[in-house]
Amino acid sequence: MRGLKATSCQDRVRVSGASCVYCGNPATTEDHFPPRCRSKKGFLLPACRSCNSTAGAAYPYHLPARIRYVQRKMAHRLRSELETPDWAEDEFDELGDGLRREVERWQKLVSNAKRRNAWSAVAYLQSIAPEAASVLLDAECDITTWLARPNWKSLESYEPA
Ligand SMILES: [Zn+2]
């Protein structure tokens, strides 16, 4: 069992980065692309827990579609935050202390949601792993075609900037 795990780990090229590739939040997990259930070989992408579990087995061989899927799901989940207009400072001043704290707490969620919604997965991936990105973001490329090449892991030498 241990040998099996080591083997499957060796067959993953790790793309290292501090931020979630899907939303820009701090990356606390690694997303398997293609998902483990579909392939032993592939890539490990930095991801937050929420995006990683949303990605799941969706669009297992096509990263651009997988990214769009995760971002669409996230925008739907965060729709209340995303539809909230920004408050002006003088509007805060009209509130009592208790209510003002509540609104400020909500505004933090709103700005986090807006930041995640505006995140460019493509620009980020290109900045942390330009050559892997050229393969992963190729809209024409089914990743299984790439993984079937004998030298597909040559990307392993790429280190994030
Ligand atoms: Zn995320």
Image: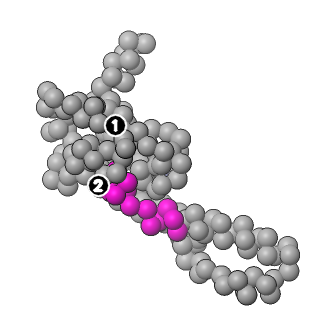
**Within the image, what quadrant is residue 43 found in?**
top left
In this view, the residue in front, 13 or 129, is: 129
Tag 1: amino acid: Glu
**Within the image, what quadrant is residue 95 found in?**
bottom right
Earlier in the chain: of badge 1 and badge 2, it is 2
Q: Of helix, strand and loop, which one carries label 1?
A: loop
To which residue does mark 1 refer?
159
Q: CA distance from mark 1 to mark 2?
A: 22 Å
Residue 29 picture location, percent across and down: 50, 39
Q: Quadrant of the N terminus?
A: top left
Quick check: can you spot residue 62? Answer: no
Q: Is residue 122 magenta?
A: yes
Q: From this view, report whether residue 26 is shown above or below residue 89.
A: above
Residue sitting at 15 percent across and 53 percent down?
140
Tag 2: amino acid: Pro
To which residue does mark 2 refer?
64
Task: Tell me how many marks there are.
Answer: 2
Q: Is residue 73 magenta?
A: no
Residue 21 picture location, percent across and down: 41, 50
Residue sitting at 42 percent across and 53 percent down?
22
Residue 156 picture location, percent across and down: 28, 31
> Answer yes or no: do the residues labelled 1 and 2 have beta carbons within 8 Å?
no
Q: From this view, report whether residue 133 is shown above or below residue 105.
A: above
Q: Bin the neighbour count of mark 2 within 10 Å (Cα to Cα): few under 14, some 14-19, many 20 and up.
A: some
In this view, the residue in front, 160 or 22, is: 160
Q: Quadrant of the C terminus?
A: top left
The magenta stretch is: 114-125
Residue sitting at 27 percent across and 31 percent down?
157
Determine the main secondary structure of the stretch shown in magenta: helix
